[in-house]
Amino acid sequence: MSTEQSSARSIPTWPWHVLLAVYLLLAVTYSIIQPLGRTPDEAAHVTYVKFIADNWRLPIWQAAGGGEGGYEAQHPPLYYGIVAVVHKLASGLSEEWRWHVMRWFTILLTGLPVFFMSRGFFRELWGDDNWYPFIATATVMLMPMTLLYTAYINPDAMVMVWTTATLWLA
């Protein structure tokens, strides 16, 4: 089959744009309607972020009580260090708005890479001449757990990024 015929059968780009817009709209909506600190361990994640932002070093963790950065300080620091920079940059805002900015940044930091890597992975798996990559990507991105974990302050969505990258590169 020639390239011209193949591209004629490819799905158009607009459904991908709509899917990304729907994901972003839903993720931002999730981030707004979830009460601050009520999602799983979010307050503890923010404690860890604030410690790094205020002290510019990693906390000393202790098994009893978690130590300086709270009990979530046992987690790897990459996500927290990146979000600590955002927390510091948003220092002119009220605490409530700083939480929202960190949530929205988490959507960009985790949700967008998962979207584009899932799209790439599924396109390589099934090709561009059918709707399977779109359907699979939509399934991943619109799952309630994906929306939840990419829309609040937590490192779990970063695990989704690394897992998706590993799967795609494998």
Image: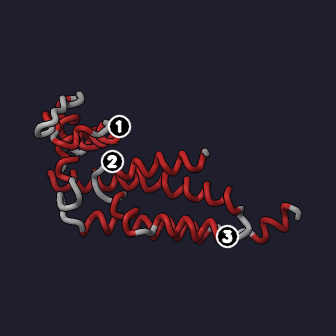
Q: Quadrant of residue 123?
A: bottom right
- Residue in the picture at 31% in, 67% down: 30
- Residue in the picture at 49% in, 64% down: 140
Q: Count residues near mark 3 (Cα–Cα under 10 Å), then give few for <14, some for 14-19, many for 20+.
A: few
The answer to which of 123 and 163 lies nearer the viewer is 163
Tell me the number on the disc at residue 155: 2
Nearest-to-viewer mark from 3 and 2: 2
- Residue in the picture at 21% in, 53% down: 41
Which residue ends up furthest to the right in the rendered image?
2
Is 161 on the left or on the right of 5, as rendered?
A: left
The kind of residue on which mark 1 rests is: Leu
Residue 103 percent coordinates (x, y): 29, 55
- Residue in the picture at 33% in, 39% down: 82
Residue 154 percent coordinates (x, y): 29, 50
Quadrant of the drawing holding the N terminus: bottom right
Tell me the number on the disc at residue 107: none
The kind of residue on which mark 3 rests is: Pro
Q: Which residue is mark 3?
A: 12
Q: Are marks 2 and 1 in contact (CB under 8 Å)?
A: yes
The answer to which of 102 and 110 lies nearer the viewer is 110
Q: Secondary structure at mark 3?
A: loop
Residue 2 percent coordinates (x, y): 88, 62
Q: In the displayed structure, would residue 89 be above or below residue 40?
A: above
